[in-house]
Amino acid sequence: MSRVATLYRSTVGKKVLMAVSGAVLFGFVFVHMVGNLKMLFPPDAAGHYAMDVYAEYLRDFGYPLVPHAGVLWIARFVLLVAVGIHIVSAVQLARLSRAARPRGYAKEKSLSLSYASRTMRWGGVILLLFIVYHILHFTTGQAHSSFVAGAVHRNYVVAFQSPIVYGVYFVAQLALCFHLYHGVWSFFQTLGLSHPKYNHLRRPFAVGFALVVFVGFLTPPTLVLVGVVS
Ligand code: HEM
């Protein structure tokens, strides 16, 4: 067996795949959160909303070197592959850890599943369901009460005027916050990025990052809900 195949089959190899795919997804989530802050800008003199200009820019990015929305489709493909790797590695690691646990004491078995790993599993499932809903909501429009293709600012405002939609996003962002907190922390652990001088900073760093993403994502929807952004 080649070295790469041996590494892939090992727990360490799967953890590294999980960490690297997680970092790609985390990078996307962070950039997406910053991009969504465009909702807070007023329209320009010609009445164009910053969010719509930004969405148009993302679709046109790379044109004419690549066809319209070409880079967007590449990004979608990379994200899909990263999500796939992340989920497959998570399932395989869960199986490996179950197989490695001693048999016999049912109670001990469930206790040995740490609070963090249980939260990660349920959080991951919630996030997956959220992503499916989210794409049907803001990208394809089937889950939106009055979707208009390309009118991102308008679709966003209409959506978050509903407390129910706001509630769904709030719960999903809470799940994301916990997932990011534990994910960022384990990322350092898995890749062996440790130094006795800085190890005590890992947890506050993970908490800080998760909170920045949580507050950043929920600020524009909250301001829509209370009528400040319209
Ligand atoms: C409060 C939280 C969020 C809001 C308000 C939000 C809003 C939006 C909006 C308005 C779009 C459409 C942009 C466009 O058409 O140009 C979008 C696209 C997208 N969002 Fe979010 N988002 C949120 C959180 C997330 C999270 C946490 C994830 C992933 C974990 C995510 C994944 C995506 C993806 C993958 C797309 C692109 C779909 C595509 O065009 O292929 N979003 N989001």
Image (cartoon, rainbow, N blue to C red):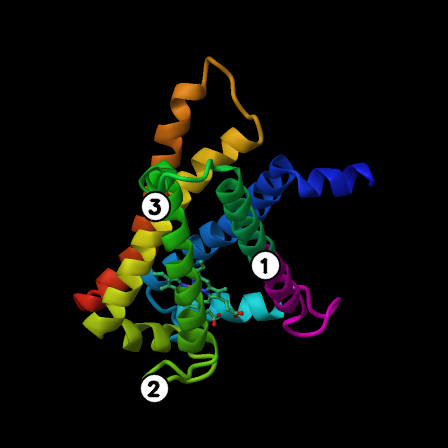
C-alpha distance separating marks 2 and 1: 31 Å
Q: Amino acid at mark 3?
A: Phe
Give 44 or 171, whichever is nearer the viewer.
171
Q: Residue at x 28, y 66 (%)?
A: 168
Q: Identify the disc placed on residue 84.
A: 1
Asked whether the beta carbons under mark 2 and mark 1 sit within 8 Å of each other, the answer is: no
Q: Residue at x 69, y 69 (%)?
A: 63
Element type where label 2 sits in the image:
loop
Inspect the magenta stretch and tell me whether residue 68 lies in it.
Answer: yes
In the rendered image of this protein, does residue 158 appear above or below residue 93?
Answer: below
- The quarter of the rendered structure image containing the C terminus is bottom left
Q: Residue at x 32, y 43 (%)?
A: 211
- Magenta range: 62-82
Q: Main secondary structure of the magenta part?
A: helix
Give 189 or 103, whichever is nearer the viewer.
103
Quadrant assignment, res 93? top right
Give 60 or 14, whichever is nearer the viewer.
14
87 sits to left or right of 155: right
Q: Amino acid at mark 1?
A: Gly
Ligand 1's quadrant is: bottom left
Residue 97 in view: yes
To which residue does mark 2 refer?
Answer: 146
10 Å crowding of disc 3: few (<14), some (14-19), many (20+)? many
37 sits to left or right of 76: left
To which residue does mark 3 refer?
Answer: 178
Q: Position of residue 98 (x, y in %)?
A: 49, 44
Inspect the magenta stretch and tell me whether residue 216 lies in it.
Answer: no
- Earlier in the chain: of badge 3 and badge 1, it is 1
Quadrant assignment, res 1? top right
